[in-house]
Image (cartoon, rainbow, N blue to C red):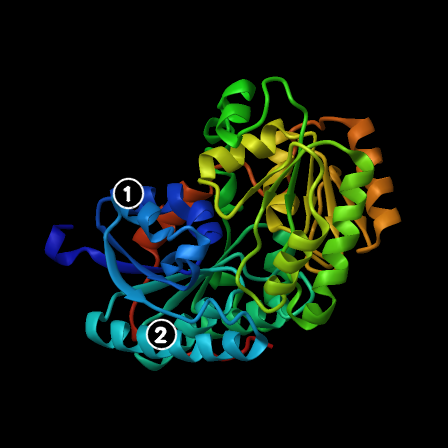
Amino acid sequence: MNAAASRRIIYLSGTRADFGLMQSTLQRIAATPGLSLQIAVTGMHLSAAHGHTVDEVQASGLPICARISLDTSTRSGASMANGIADCLRGMTDLLAREQPDLLLVLGDRGEMLAGAIAALHTGVPCVHIHGGERSGTVDEPVRHAISKLCSYHFVATTGSRDRLVQMGEHPERIFVTGAPGLDGLSELAAMRKDDCLHALGLAPGQAFILALFHPVVQQAGQAREQTLALLEALQGIGLPVVWLDPNADAGSREILAALDAGGLPAGSVRLAHMARPLFAAAMRHCEVLVGNSSAGIIEAASLGTSVVNIGDRQHLRERNANVIDVSAEREAIEAALRQALAHGKWPCDNLWGDGRAGERIASLLASLPVGPQLLEKVNCY
């Protein structure tokens, strides 16, 4: 297939998290004969307060075809809904102009929902990665809504596949690829511990806890109290903490205010952004990962890292044995942290995949049928 006949794909990226998970897969897609890839950048990527991570997208060498600005500073439920509207307008204009063969989206964020709606209405088939998962809160209905708008599904587990079939998706359009974020993760995290500690601003040989706690949108009013409970538990443990600031969802202002009021243990470091190689190394070398990030549910097991998962943000998601689930209460968090610290490292077994998702995804994108017939969807039940 010559360059003029290449299958044109746009990937929509809204956060440091989704781009980091997908980067190796995107680079594999871009290197696959017959495929042409561009990135549409939006959301927190364009926010200085969140590290202006569009620079990392640009540094990857992947071509950016659009920058769609959203309000990431108001941090309310209403601003999140308006952000979906703004992203919908931007993606509609982009897809109507470019008419790619496929739009690729990942996960459950509002930007991805906007992209899937725009794709359906501009005649562009959409491919959804990480559909079919249970996670509770606002994330789950958004994830399932994206799935119903999409033509193909690249899922991480057989359980996710089965749930999509129960939702009426056609089995022949669902493919178990594994989680892209596991591809090359061990190599990405290969930084020596002392080098990692130096990069984080910690003393040589220092044991530390890695914390990443995001707001739950429906519980935004409780975010400050939940964060203070976590901070009190961390003070009770006493180890230095590397704290990575939350996303821009409703409730994140309350988390930041609690950090200012409650404080971290002596010797701790607080960062607005961490490049993915350093984050992977920190996840590998920390004593425990605490919070409610999907990294603890999906990626940490491949590094043998103990995880304390707090609250409802990852509710009912499939888990590996390294995860301890607790309520957002000081005593429960501290007890779980002590249990995780006592256990130490786990075997690097992971139900979310074998680290070969990217090659499967690139192969499928190059070979699956495309065209307007994909948009003629009916439930299979």
Query: Could you say where residue 157 lies in the image, as x and y percent from the top left?
Result: 60, 50
For the residues labelled 1 and 2, the Cα–Cα distance comes to: 27 Å
Viewer-side residue, 194 vs 311: 194
In the drawing, what numbered circle is on residue 119?
A: 2
* SS state under label 1: helix
Position of 17 with respect to 97 (left or right) is right
Viewer-side residue, 379 vs 30: 30
Viewer-side residue, 188 vs 369: 188
Viewer-side residue, 52 vs 87: 52
* SS state under label 2: helix
> Residue, x 24% and y 77% (percent of image)?
96
Query: Could you say where residue 63 lies in the image, as x and y percent from the top left?
Result: 23, 52
> Residue, x 57% and y 74% (percent of image)?
76
Rendered position, 173 above or below 338 = below
- Outermost residue to the front: 261
Rendered position, 237 above or below 16 = above
In this rendering, does residue 235 appear at all?
yes
Query: Could you say where residue 118 lies in the image, as x and y percent from the top left?
Result: 36, 77
> Residue, x 81% and y 50% (percent of image)?
326
Dot 2 amino acid type? Ala
Number of other residues with Cα within 10 Å of mark 2, as a class: few under 14, some 14 to 19, many 20 or more: many
